[in-house]
Image: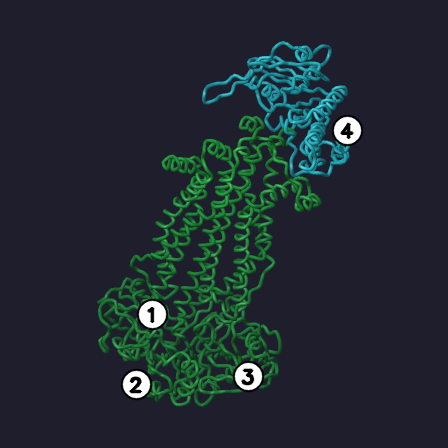
Chain colours: A cyan, B green
Amino acid sequence: MNLNGKQALINLEQVRKVYRTKAGPLEVLKGVDFQVGEGEFVAVVGPSGSGKSTLINMITGIDRPTQGEVYVANQRLTRMSENRVARWRGRNVGVVFQFFQLLPTLTVMENVMMPMNYVGTFTGRRRQRAMELLERVDLPDVADKYPSQISGGQQQRAAIARALANDPKLIVGDEPTGNLDTVSAGLIFALFEELVSQGTSIVMVTHDRDLAGQVPHVVEVRDGCIVPEVDMRLVSSN
Amino acid sequence: MIKTRTRKIWGDILSRKGRTALVSFSIFIGVLGVVTLFSMGDILVSRLEQDIQEDKLAMTKLGLTTSERATELPDARDFLTMVEAQPGVAKAEGQIISQFYFREPDSDDFDQGSLIAYFTPLTEVELEPPQLIEGDYPVSGTKQLAVERRMADTYDLKVGDTLVLRMVSQAGEGLSIPEENWTVSGIVFQPYAIVDNVNMSTTIFTTFEDAQYISGITGFTTLFVRYTDFATAQAEVSNLTGVIAGDTPHIPYYSLVFDPEQNVQIGEAANISSVLGLLGIVALVVSGFLVVNVVNSIVVEQKRQIGVMKSLGASGWDNVVIYAGIALGYGLLGVVPGVLLGIPAGFFAAKGMASNMNTVIDKFEFSPSSIIMGILIGLAVPILAALIPVYNGSRVKILDAMTDLGIDSSYGKGFLARLIKRLPLPATVRQGISNVSQKKGRLAFTMLTLAIAAGAFMGIFALFSSIDSVLNKTFDTYNVEILIQPDQQQDFNTVRQLIEDNIEGIQFVQPHNGLSVEVEGYDSAEGGADYGVSVEGYDPDAPDSVFVLDLQDGVQLSESDNPNSIIITAGIADALKKGVGDSVVITGAGNSREMTIVGISTFPFNSLWVRWDVLAEFGGYTLNGQPAARNLLVKLDKEDPTAAETADVIEDINELLLAHGITATYGNFPELIEEITTLVRVFQIIFNITAGLIALVGALGLLTAISMSVFERQKEIGVMRSIGAGSMAVATQFLTEGLIVGVLAWSIGLPISYGLSQLIAAALEMGDAFKLTYPILAPIVGIIGMLIITAMASLYPSISASRKTVSDILRYQ
């Protein structure tokens, strides 16, 4: 699929997600169509419970649709086993969480090396690559420190270095700046922009409308549906 | 409020049935062990204390044989009067204990058993008397006998039944042995262990005169003496043996001294039950560790619930009541069936062990003190064990409980974290060690349990390896299968020729004499008994020696020209601080002699070896004025014959000798080895089962701890999954952590195992012969076992961790 002249990296077709709850079925996504092209930077916004986290879980293969198809980087995720999806995700998608989620008992360097260990890439030069990535996020000095020994902003940059470990085409962030002060959030956002400029696609869930206003494409999810793309710069200024 | 709390407690207990079953089962096992083992000991000891009356116990037991002068034996009454006139003697009782042959009227085959007769009429016996249970004591000249109750049970004999006896007293060359019908006049119970080789399930009692008539033995074969006190017995026994050897035709070939206040039977029963009971308590205590883990896991799981309850007004005390109540609930679920099953199990265990303790438990008995102990410990252990996690639960803060800030990242500040960071290990292993070190408190109990289990297992392994080594060394020293001890002194060469000419499969027959002596300066007493020191007299010049003595110093007797040469064991040499070339003075059978030490043997039981003819002369075993062999030792052609094969040859030899008028007692070495080995294996199995139970509890603890870890670290699993970890990577992480716990527990268990093996050996009073060694195989088997146990225990939570999908985790969060 071609998207605005760019190859579509993410393609969700009529994706429905229904959770079975004791109170009855809960439809979180209601037949969503969603595409993101290569090298695109997309912000997903929406109120709590609107389905935006479920949407990005579909993209990362963390969750599966009840109906519809999910294609990411030419892979049909809906037909892959949980284990294959994990490996695929390790190679193709970098995930950045709100609370960083670095493994506390590993050093920063080891955290960055973990995805390479899991999927078996960069054998023999994992340490070197991890250091390159840490230099890229401006953290070479904390490589041998534990996560608890560095600041929140540094932890999130380390998490981004980890997300980049296997040189993925796609970075997915769930509120990646939600737990940071404005200075740290600005640094992270700058890092994202740099990645996009180098051809990486980024899909980022955020509640921060100012931040969303700086993203070229903003998608709003409301009641399980995607509303037409809005210009957050206007929303923000209004 | 109380009803609500109770509902919450039972709700929590029943909502996780698997976990409740695990904890309650482990408490059940512990309580069952405590009640069963203590009941067993209590029932046995109280029965022995009822049956064995201290004031009726002999303090000295002498084994008597007769010298050449036996043709003119003194009147038995006069002999006992003479003994009772010796200094310090309060009472003396003479006996005939001999082999006899019997069959039931409808059977063709004769069985061999023990015939016991007291000189004093059975109604008046004061030293170690049997008790009449049914019928009457036998009357002389009426062909009556009384059977021991265990024989009555074995052969289903009742008062009035008939047994056919062989009148071996009338055996002779060219004569057929007459058979006579004897009537069972009564059934008796002999609670006193007369001598070790009497099997009560084939034992009869007759009057003294009838025993002489049946066996042909005229004098006493054993003499029981009670002194005014034990110290006098110890001091006077050599005087008594001297008087008997010097003034009568009897030769006292062994003398045993016992302290009535430390009865060996009661002591053994108490020791064994104490050791086993303590292991039961250990099992129960380690099950408490499991309670710690489980209550901890409940508190962890219900952290949010606790927060909610607190936000609704619940106090710390309310939480204490709820979670301590859960621990009590687990205790009750384990204690009730544990006690109910422990009561009959204790009875049946006592009944089963009774034959080894020379007693009989027939009517149902139970031990109230053991039941109370089981209930108290069974309820106290889980409640005490729950105190720490319950306290932690009561301190949970609402804010902590309700906030979710991702993976806790406080790790890395301590010395341990810095140390682990420097370990040159793969990241997965280092991460495992870090995770284990983070949960030190929680894993401490599990690790301790596993360490105790590993220690117990390795210690028991080391202990029984040492016992096996002692036994093998003992068994290997004897290069014979059969001991023949004729009732009357025989010419050795005649009997040997008879056997070699008529019995097939005999490699050699050699002379032997045995005597128990005192060694000057050496105290042979152990516990409440003094068996003296055994001297073995053999032919060291024979091409195949009957004793294969391993010497740590000196030479074999065959290499010494001095007839008064002696080989002593290293234990005696060490105690006397003597070596090769030194002399020792031995005293026995009324004689004393200075012997020259030519060799020091590594044989584990303290003994002495001399030339058989020298011992014959020393002990008074003579025939026609020449030294005579009292016993014959027979080696079979067949290599390693079984007990049954040896018994067949013994039967043939017995028939042959009876046909020539020779009655004898026989020893079957392979049978003895089988009996000893079986007994050792039974104890080994009991100990290993106990260690296995502790390991099971430890494994359950590890399973719970890792399951808790999986529960707590769901976010971590989610993150690992998010960055590409497959199921194997996740499972390996948790499996590694389990194995790390196992390796740590094993390393802690190593010193425990050494101490425990020493402790059990001391508690079981293994004696001087036992030298504990610690085989290298023990830690190897220990680590293999530990890795298997921990891998199995970690497998389920590891697999369950690997099956968690990120969406499951996120949805739960």
* N-terminal-most mark, 1 or 3: 1
Quadrant where the N terminus of chain A is found in the figure: top right
Q: In this orientation, does residue B13 appear?
A: yes
Q: Nearer the viewer, residue B742 or A156?
A: A156
Q: Amino acid at mark 2?
A: Arg
Q: Chain of mark 2?
A: B
To the question of a shared chain for discs 1 and 3, the answer is yes
For mark 4, what is the residue?
A136
Residue B77, which numbered label? 2
Q: 10 Å neighbourhood of mark 2: few (<14), some, or many (≥20)?
A: few
Residue B751 appears in which quarter of the rendering?
Answer: bottom right
Q: Are marks 2 and 1 in contact (CB under 8 Å)?
A: no
Front one among B297 and B228: B297
Q: Which residue is mark 3?
A: B584
Q: Are marks 3 and 4 on the same chain?
A: no
Q: Nearer the viewer, mark 2 or mark 4?
A: 4
Q: Which quarter of the picture shows residue B34?
A: bottom left
Under circle 3, the secondary element is strand
